[in-house]
Image: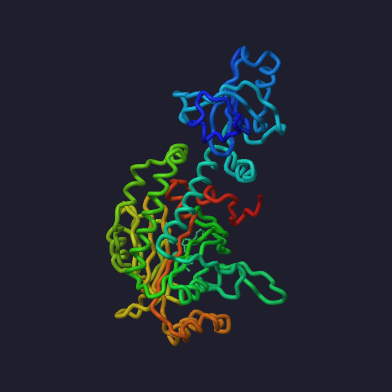
Amino acid sequence: METINIIHSPKYVNQKVRIGVWVSNKRSSGKIAFLELRDGTAFFQGVVLKNDIGEEKFKEATELRQETSLYVTGEIHEDSRSKFGYEIQIEDFEVVGESNDYPITPKEHGIDFLLDHRHLWLRSSKPNALMKIRSEVIHACYDFFYSREFTKFDAPILTGSAPEGTTELFETDYFGQNAYLSQTGQLYGEAGAMALGKIFTFGPTFRAEKSKTRRHLTEFWQIEPEMAWYHQDESLELQEQFVAYLVQSVIDNCPQELEVIGRDVDTLKKYTQLPYPRISYDDAISLLQDNGFDVKWGIDFGSPEETFLANHFDKPVFVMNYPKDIKAFYMQPHPTRDDLVICADLLAPEGYGEIIGGSERSADYDYIVGRLKETGQDLSNYTWYLDLLKYGPVPHSGFGMGLERFLTWITHEDHLRENIPFPRMLHRLEP
Ligand code: 4AD
Ligand code: MG
């Protein structure tokens, strides 16, 4: 008899198998008990018949508590009434680990309670589906960039600089010297691009933002490709291909998970159609003003503005070339407008806002030194970065996508917190 995973049930119809499972729910009547079982790969039903298994074992089955772990043996049958389509007719079971008073019961719990029990909540069907979609998207990110001859390039997490602004830094003591948890892998990615051509970093990044919005985590995962020789238009094309590829991968490889979370697949399909619309920052301001927003040229968009813009186009939209004053020091200045930089944010529809921020980078030593000074940075933290501009600088562009921002949009969640295993937020460091 083979030991299998639930997900492989279709290959074992009418065969006897053994499966290691947890009991996630159960119901029973006088002669029959239904155990909802999970093993991580899927959820399905185990049927226990008193007549098959005997009085004593049947009683044991009806008394199994939620999250008890078991080995079950029995025959796999088709079960047309369930979504999964298969069940196991249990002939015997053996308890492996007891579980008493499991805190997350099938009734409704508040979000704070669930987050406090995140280490257990991950076992439930919705978190399970969200984590599988996350894993699929991570896989697709690697596939996308490897198939385009990018090299994966890891940026350090402990750093000495603050490229995305000095107000959002986690500071730590590094043997008597100040160090910060990295806000972005980008500057190191630029060094990588000058060495390897096309690279992507993919790792945790940190923002000490004291904001409690549904779009912010203090620790989030960022994919940051950086391409030597690319100008911004080539980078924008890559970005939209990337996003469409990720959406298609989820549609193709996570149909069950999308069903569990109730995400409409036809809506997702719209987002695989390229190109995505593009609008300049200037035009975005006019469009907002024409639609009753009280916005002045020079502001950064907040959530209501971003929501309006993306919904207006009903697709992800690139907002291009923002004012220099509200963007980071490294961006390439606009050739004819010295108040603008060559950059774009990709805004997702349905109220999800910015999922990608990117730009062409300036390769001009003097310009960058000037911008570092203007933005109040300590030049001595950037000695190595400035070297990149001294020794054969070339045009280059890159972008950063927040993994949880992307996922929250694709899964249509209200808040980023359910799309990362253990969210870190303003008031949450546990579990
Ligand atoms: O726009 P940001 O700050 O850009 C950078 O860090 C650049 N260095 C990227 C680059 O060009 N290599 O952040 C990039 C993306 C955002 O578009 C958003 O998706 C995500 O990172 N992000 C956050 N996600 C969750 N929580 C936060 N607090 C985030 N801040 C940014
Ligand atoms: Mg940004």
319 vs 92, left or right, is left
- Residue 331 sits in which quadrant? bottom left
Task: Classify 144 as above or below 20.
Answer: below
291 vs 19, left or right, is left
Task: Classify 246 as above or below 260.
Answer: below
Residue at image position (39%, 58%) is 242
> How many tags in the picture?
0
Quarter of the figure with the N terminus = top right
140 vs 430, left or right, is left
Q: Where in the figure is residue 176, as x and y percent of width and height?
A: 72, 76
Q: Residue furthest front?
A: 1
Residue at image position (54%, 42%) is 127
Q: How is the image coloured?
A: rainbow
- Residue 323 sits in which quadrant? bottom left
Q: Where in the figure is residue 256, as x and y percent of width and height?
A: 45, 38
Task: Classify 316 as above or below 398.
Answer: above
Answer with the quadrant where ligand 2 appears in the image: bottom left
Q: Where in the figure is residue 332, as x and y percent of width and height?
A: 39, 77
Residue at image position (67%, 28%) is 65
Q: Where in the figure is residue 85, as x and y percent of width and height?
A: 46, 28
* Nearest the eye: 5 or 110: 5
